[in-house]
Image (cartoon, rainbow, N blue to C red):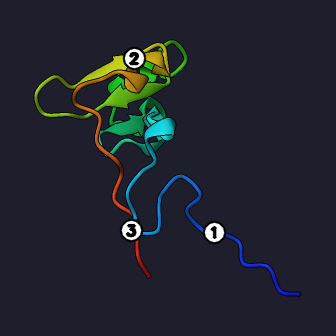
Amino acid sequence: MHQTVDPHPDHDSHGNALEANRAAHSCRWSEPTLFRPFPQWLEADDRPWSCLNPRNPHPFESTEACRTCAEWEPEPVKRR
């Protein structure tokens, strides 16, 4: 029996992020702070994620705020 592995387990069949997975790694606005340009990436040890939302861009210490953030949006699914 062949079993199919879902390539996007955080998304439903339409490519929408599941509500239970509201987190920095699944938000369209977040990026690891280490990937930010100098000197912003220097904060990566203390603030590992950055919110790039144009309304309020900022690095953050904890991803807990992502669960209830009003600006959270699912990251678009990249199609091949």
- Structural crowding at the residue carrying mark 3, measured as other residues with C-alpha within 10 Å and reported as few (<14), some (14–19) or many (≥20): few
Q: Earlier in the sequence, mark 3 or mark 1?
A: 1
Q: Could you say which is closer to the camera, residue 11 or residue 63?
A: 11
Which residue occupies the extreme bottom position in the image?
A: 1
Q: Earlier in the sequence, mark 1 or mark 2?
A: 1
Mark nearest the camera among 1 and 2 is 1
Q: Could you say which is closer to the camera, residue 13 or residue 46?
A: 13
- Structural crowding at the residue carrying mark 1, measured as other residues with C-alpha within 10 Å and reported as few (<14), some (14–19) or many (≥20): few
Q: Secondary structure at mark 2?
A: helix
Count of numbered badges drawn on the protein: 3
The kind of residue tagged 2 is Ala
**x%, y% of residue 14?**
38, 68
- At x 63%, y 68%, the residue is 6
Query: Which residue is disc 3 drawn over?
Result: 14
Query: Which residue is disc 1 drawn over?
Result: 6
- At x 89%, y 87%, the residue is 1
Mark nearest the camera among 3 and 2 is 3
Query: Which residue is disc 2 drawn over?
Result: 65
Residue 14 horizontal side relative to residue 53, left or right: right
Which residue occupies the extreme left position in the image?
A: 55
- At x 20%, y 34%, the residue is 53
Q: Secondary structure at mark 1?
A: loop
Q: Examine the rendered structure and indicate whether residue 65 appears above or below residue 6.
A: above
